[in-house]
């Protein structure tokens, strides 16, 4: 690690979480105490940076010290009770990826319904308030889509292109980053990557683990699960060059019909539907769900 740091090639890790809560435990929920323990460990051993700064270091091929970025997937309302206000109060940057149709309609995620515990999802107002406080809002498709099962160009554009524009309207901000649901190698198909590039997204995030190293493609950001088991998480974050050799090969073929891939890209310019939304009244009631305030007086500079 010392040699990599001296050569400005220190690894950059990106953690992803789903839900921070002490109720309804499941495989994608971590307790509040464990979450704080994770972040405090990261603050002690790494530089915590924004996702944008992580990408900038990869683009500039200069990473002077081991760093970590924090992200969330899906968009659970419970995160606005503790995790996001806690990050804001502690000036810790975060990118928060949401599925737009679940937000728009308040529809629980299928995996929660199957688990017989439908959980509340974020509202548009919560996302605007978080964005106003410096949390970057990112895209997680429209319907939490599995790109290994999408077979037409129109479906692909609905889940990425249209969803990006819808989210920009919801929050009144440009959307720069996209986290692929499930994020395994089989979902990271060429058409998905190219569609994300073509519609103006700055980067795409996977979820199968791995470091981000100087020399990697800065458009594809690899992420590590914020494992509730602290020992496993610490092992993941401990740099080992042998792990670099375990990086899986991404698919080179698409499940989308060849004739659809030849169709012209039909997206509008990235910002053509993005309005300016006033958010000054969103924080008057305290926390992002209402009640006593956990937020600082000034926005976080992520």
Image (cartoon, rainbow, N blue to C red):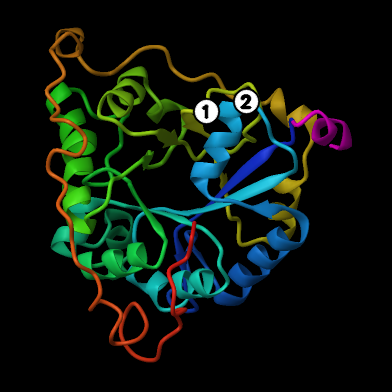
Callout 1: 10 Å neighbours few (<14), some, many (20+)?
many
Across and down, in percent, residue 145 comes to 27, 40
The answer to whether residue 114 is above or below residue 273 is below
Residue drawn 81% across the image and 31% down it: 4
Q: Which residue is mark 1?
A: 218
Magenta segment includes 102? no
Q: Which residue is mark 2?
A: 247
Looking at the image, residue 137 sits to the left or right of residue 69; the answer is left
256, 216: nearer the viewer: 216
User: Chief secondary structure of the magenta span?
Assistant: helix
80, 143: nearer the viewer: 80
Residue drawn 41% across the image and 41% down it: 182
Across and down, in percent, residue 179 comes to 39, 42
Across and down, in percent, residue 290 comes to 30, 85
Callout 2: 10 Å neighbours few (<14), some, many (20+)?
few
- Which residues are drawn in magenta? 1-8
The answer to whether residue 3 is seen in the rendering is yes
Looking at the image, residue 126 sits to the left or right of residue 88; the answer is left
Q: How many marks?
A: 2
Q: Which mark is residue 112?
A: none
């Amino acid at each position: 690690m010392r040699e990599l740091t001296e050569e400005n090639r220190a690894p950059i890790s990106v953690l992803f979480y789903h839900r921070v809560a002490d109720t309804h435990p499941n495989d994608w929920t971590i307790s509040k105490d464990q979450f704080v323990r994770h972040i405090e460990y990261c603050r002690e051993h790494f530089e915590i940076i924004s996702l944008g700064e992580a990408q900038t270091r990869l683009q500039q091929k200069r990473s002077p010290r081991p760093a970590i970025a924090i992200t969330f997937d899906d968009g659970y309302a419970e995160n606005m009770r503790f995790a996001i206000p806690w990050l804001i109060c502690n000036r810790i940057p975060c990118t928060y990826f949401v599925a737009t149709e679940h937000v728009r309609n308040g529809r629980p995620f299928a995996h929660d319904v199957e688990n017989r515990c439908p959980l509340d999802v974020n509202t548009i107002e919560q996302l605007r308030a978080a964005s106003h406080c410096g949390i970057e809002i990112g895209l997680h498709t429209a319907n939490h889509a599995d790109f290994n099962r999408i077979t037409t160009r129109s479906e692909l554009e609905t889940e990425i292109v249209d969803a990006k524009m819808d989210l920009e309207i919801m929050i009144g901000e440009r959307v720069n980053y996209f986290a692929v649901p499930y994020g395994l190698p089989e979902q990271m198909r060429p058409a998905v990557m190219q569609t994300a590039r073509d519609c103006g997204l700055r980067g795409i995030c996977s979820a199968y683990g791995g470091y981000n190293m100087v020399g990697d493609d800065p458009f594809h950001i690899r992420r590590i699960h914020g494992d509730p088991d602290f020992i496993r998480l610490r092992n993941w974050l401990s740099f080992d060059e042998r792990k670099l050799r375990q990086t899986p090969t991404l698919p080179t073929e698409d499940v989308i019909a060849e004739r659809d891939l030849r169709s012209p890209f039909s997206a509008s310019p990235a910002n053509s539907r993005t309005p300016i939304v006033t958010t000054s009244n969103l924080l008057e009631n305290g926390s992002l769900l209402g009640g006593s305030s956990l937020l600082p007086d000034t926005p976080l500079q992520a």
